Amino acid sequence: MEKAKMTVDKDFTIGVVDKRLYGSFIEHLGRAVYGGIYEPGHPTATEAGFRGDVLEMVKELQVPIVRYPGGNFVSGYNWEDSVGPVSERKRRLELAWRTIETNEFGFNEFVDWSKQANSEVMMAVNLGTRGVDAARNIVEYSNHPEGSYYSDLRIKHGYKEPHAIKTWCLGNEMDGPWQIGHKTAEEYGRIALEAAKVMKWTDPTIELVACGSSSLGMPSFPEWEATVLDHTYDHVEYLSLHQYYGNAEQDTPTFLARSLEMDRFIETVKATCDYIKAKKRSKKTMFLSFDEWNVWYHSNESDKKLDPWQIAPPQLEDVYNHEDALLVGCMLISMLKHADRVKMACLAQLVNVIAPIMTDNGGAAWRQTIFYPFMHASVFGRGTALVPLIQSPKYDTKQITDVPYLEGIAVHNEEQGEVTVFAVNRHLEESLPLEVDLRSFGKCQLIEHIVLESDDLKAANTAAQPNRVAPHNRGGAELSDTLITASLAKASWNVIRLKVQ
């Protein structure tokens, strides 16, 4: 097979990788909370009822921020139901996912869990059934020190110190007709603006995320973004993007090329933001929060068979296979290629619900295939993303043309004195010879070459076989001066780590 080449130069930078690019998401949906992060009585449970085995896996991922409590759930969320004595909390019909929400686990419990997970909170406010008043009140409850009704209520609930939550989402997917309280772009732009104003009047230190389109395929994209930003540009710091991909047609070459669509999605949103920047004669640059992304399609049919109004039913429990991990790796590379503008992102979700971590109620927890590329990027992808000059053989699919077999990028962690190359070989049948030219770095030392590979694209990890698909560090990359040579196994995710001397 024709050789692929990547050239990287430490002076040709894309941008600093914000650690929050490796965020995740917990929604009150399925078993994400109950049986996921929270299960009193589990053998590993903490005194607060948090699953200890799950906490340890979350710490492995080094997740710096977690979005909460939704998702579609937030558009019907009364935050007051989730605080105070558990015995006094109300059970509610949860209309987004047609379940019963007990509110046994609520806002303060999530803040406590996040601290134990070494993570910050990205809190969403309800702009579906609620609005400006509820938005300012929850910020007061969360962040005001004392001496007001809601801050004193927090203190009464046992939290003397403010939660000091910095990042807040102004609703969720408000362009979607499935959303409780769905709005037009004008309607949402107006309420988002007014909510943003009072939230920042309550706490001027917070930063806000406005809702962009809920997917690349929405008919209103990107007009929605332009209209919303027309209202909110001066009052928010981020605009959100959401995107999921699936392979229901079993067309793996196209599936693995979907990250090219993700690239175009990001570029279009950037261009729309910059159009509004120019229109407003603003000096401010709008950053992006890709706060929902993943593979999602395996569980669609089984979810249709679930009876409504259960408590924490097994919803959206995709069992991920090897090819899913490859696309997740490509999507991570896509976001790193846009690290100058994509400053936050949330793998949706974290436990049980389209998640890298799965559990059995009362039993074991295990790592899905997608756990590994996400962990590798989070742990080794900190620093500055470098422009990847790539030459690669290409292929065409029915839907996407000129797809490079090599997807790759490099990240320079100057503080640690390391360079990490992330690379995916999309070829399903052949290994890919690769050269990486690190000419500007001087003498380097190869640390390791990690590979995630499988002879079966559909191989998955389960409770019975938790390590069926797992990485190894026998990749075989070699380093001569500043030139890496490697053979990337067919359909593989690769992490090549170097020490800069």
Image (cartoon, rainbow, N blue to C red):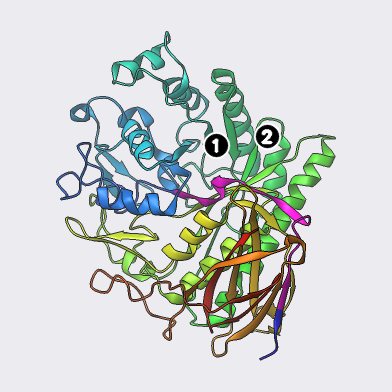
Q: Which residue is mark 1?
A: 170
Q: Determine which quarter of the picture holds residue 8.
A: bottom right
Measured from the top left, where is residue 451 in percent x and y? 49, 74
Q: Is residue 471 visible?
A: yes
Measured from the top left, where is residue 214 in percent x and y? 56, 53
Residue drawn 40% across the image and 69% down it: 369
Measured from the top left, where is residue 421 in percent x and y? 61, 66
Residue drawn 20% across the image and 56% down it: 361
- Point out the image quarter for the N terminus: bottom right
Q: Are marks 2 and 1 in contact (CB under 8 Å)?
A: yes
Compare residues 173 and 149 and report the one nearer the observer. Answer: 149
Residue 481 shown left or right of residue 64 in the figure: right
Compare residues 23 and 186 and report the one nearer the observer. Answer: 23
Q: Is 386 included in the stretch rendered in magenta?
A: no
Q: Is residue 128 above or below residue 317?
A: above
Q: Residues within 10 Å of mark 2 (few under 14, many from 20)?
A: many
Segment tinted magenta in the rendering: 5-24
Q: Which residue is mark 2?
A: 232
For the residue marked with disc 1, what is the amino acid? Leu
Could you tell me which secondary element the residue under label 2 belongs to?
helix
For the residue marked with disc 2, what is the amino acid? Thr
Sequence-wise, the earlier of marks 2 and 1 is: 1
Q: Is 9 included in the stretch rendered in magenta?
A: yes
